[in-house]
Image: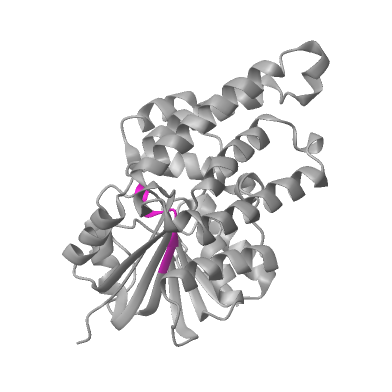
Amino acid sequence: MTTNTSGSDPAPNPHATEEQVKAALQDTKLAQVLYHDWEAETYDDKWSISYDERCIDYARGRFDAIVPHASLPYERAMELGCGTGFFLLNLMQSGVAKQGSVTDLSPGMVRVALRNAEHLGLDVDGRVADAEKIPYDDNTFDLVVGHAVLHHIPDVELSLREVLRVLKPGGRFVFAGEPSTIGDFYARWLSRATWYVTTNVTRIPALAGWRRPQAELDESSRAAALEAVVDIHTFDPDDLAGIARKAGAAKVDTATEEFAAAMLGWPVRTVEAAVPPDKLSWGWARFAFGGWRGLSWLDEKVLRKIVPPKFFYNVIVTGTKPAA
């Protein structure tokens, strides 16, 4: 059963006007809504998100990397900043939780997440919610998760205090996919360089069929301008752990992942945004996923032993609500 528990939730706005975008450049929460409403219907395709074995294994891998011996399943879990539901829905499919709630500041994302949950037959409700003021009662959830969400939140400590408030005593949070400070630097550099090269090479007449329509490229550029507003933070792993402890969390731990894998992943995603999807064959998808898996193995088995954790791209943090 999938429900939207608040009939007063605002409607999505997937086509922001130029005036709204200008206003959003000065208002990060408006930017969050406009950017993520704009992306909601195409987000899964853009980031190659699925709800099959590939992404179930990926989501569960992130969870197990930081909580390897959890007693499963949790009865009720919430995803903060759910996007299209990628993290929670795939964790539920892997047996991490029985019942779920999805929350996001973007009405468009909540709508897509609920639709995905319904297609999967999962027991999920949804709310449009500000992460700094979560609209659920104290001591509601056994688990709160999020993927690539904390770096969008203006006051991370306040949000984590809210997470701890809605958790039951002893309940746990797991946030994965947060950009490290060093990782974000090289990922953005690689993305910008790849975008520049791809959009200029495809100006050559012989390669014109490999170029998206200019209107789509312009829209992507406007989205990139908003992205610079919605991506507020990067994290040093130790600093993020300190924020969690200051918020009141116990048993705080962090892990990092993706170094060589990020060096491939970000250019691949940028090419996919710049080139018409029908030009990228199954061979491309196999190359992208196979390359990521191979480099992830290299990261885990070799580079983790010699590269300091703060150089890896993704940070994962967990903690618990102190027992009453």
**Vertical placement of residue 247 versus 180, above or below:** below
In the image, 192 versus 256, the foreground residue is 256
Quadrant showing the N terminus: bottom right
| Res 176 → quadrant | bottom left
Question: What residue sits 45% from the left and 57% below the top?
Answer: 304
The mark total stands at 0
Question: What residue sits 44% from the left and 36% below the top?
Answer: 186
**Vertical placement of residue 50 versus 324, above or below:** above
Residue 80 appears in the picture as rendered = no
| Res 181 → quadrant | top left
In the image, 323 versus 302, the foreground residue is 302
Residue 26, x across and y down, in percent: 31, 30
Question: What residue sits 52% from the left and 64% below the top?
Answer: 87
Residue 246 appears in the picture as rendered = yes
Where are the magenta residues, as a range? 145-151
Question: What residue sits 34% from the left and 56% below the top?
Answer: 130
